Image (cartoon, helix red, strand yellow):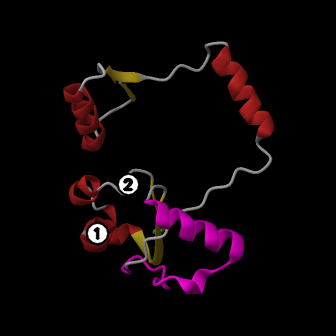
Amino acid sequence: CPFDIVLDCVSSADPRDQQTFSYRQLLQQDVHIQKLLNEAAVYRRLGGPSLDWLRAGMEQKLGWTGVWKYTTTKRNSNDDRLFWIRFPHTSLQLQALSIMANQGQLLPKVEKVYSFSATDVERAFDDLLSRRVRGKIVV
């Protein structure tokens, strides 16, 4: 069955990221992906520049949806809004996670550790932008 929403957890506002991985454009052009989506499927991303977060906040808190230049949400549009996430009533779960982290029960997977030098920081960013990392990058 076709999907109703594509939630992009990878894209960022970094121009290098946009040049290398334009997921919205891929959704619009790839015939195989188009078959998996509803005609009215919505594209939302979790990351973006500050102005996008301001827009998302205004829409969420004040309902100012008509103020912005985009008005459509269909998959073939240029609608590029952020997905606003709220986690109400999660304080007990967050406290439990905090206790587990403090006890050393939650350990992140570290993919690679770099020294704090210009060359290594550049390498760390290259790894991050490659989208091939399966853990945390530590500088």
Find residue 99 and report its image quarter.
top right
- Left or right of residue 129, residue 50 in this image: right
Q: Note whether residue 82 is visible.
A: no
Q: Is residue 68 magenta?
A: yes
Single out the mark in the foreground, 1 or 2.
2
Question: Which residue is under mark 2?
Answer: 12
* Disc with the residue nearer the chain's start (1 vs 2): 2
Question: Which residue is under mark 1?
Answer: 25
The picture places residue 126, in percent across and down from the top left corner, at: 23, 38
Find residue 97 and report its image quarter.
top right
Mark 2 lies on a secondary structure that is: loop
- Left or right of residue 91, residue 27 in this image: left
Q: Tag 2: residue type?
A: Ser
What residue range appears in magenta? 49-77
Please determine whether, in this image, residue 5 is positioned above or below residue 39.
above
Residue 69, disc:
none
The picture places residue 38, in percent across and down from the top left corner, at: 45, 75
Comparing 18 with 40, the one in front is: 18
Residue at 28% x, 62% y: name it. Answer: 22
Q: Between marks 1 and 2, how big is the CA–CA gap?
A: 14 Å
Residue at 75% x, 35% y: name it. Answer: 93
Q: Is residue 81 magenta?
A: no
Please determine whether, in this image, residue 69 is positioned above or below residue 57.
below
The picture places residue 119, in percent across and down from the top left corner, at: 19, 28
Q: Note whether residue 57 is visible.
A: yes
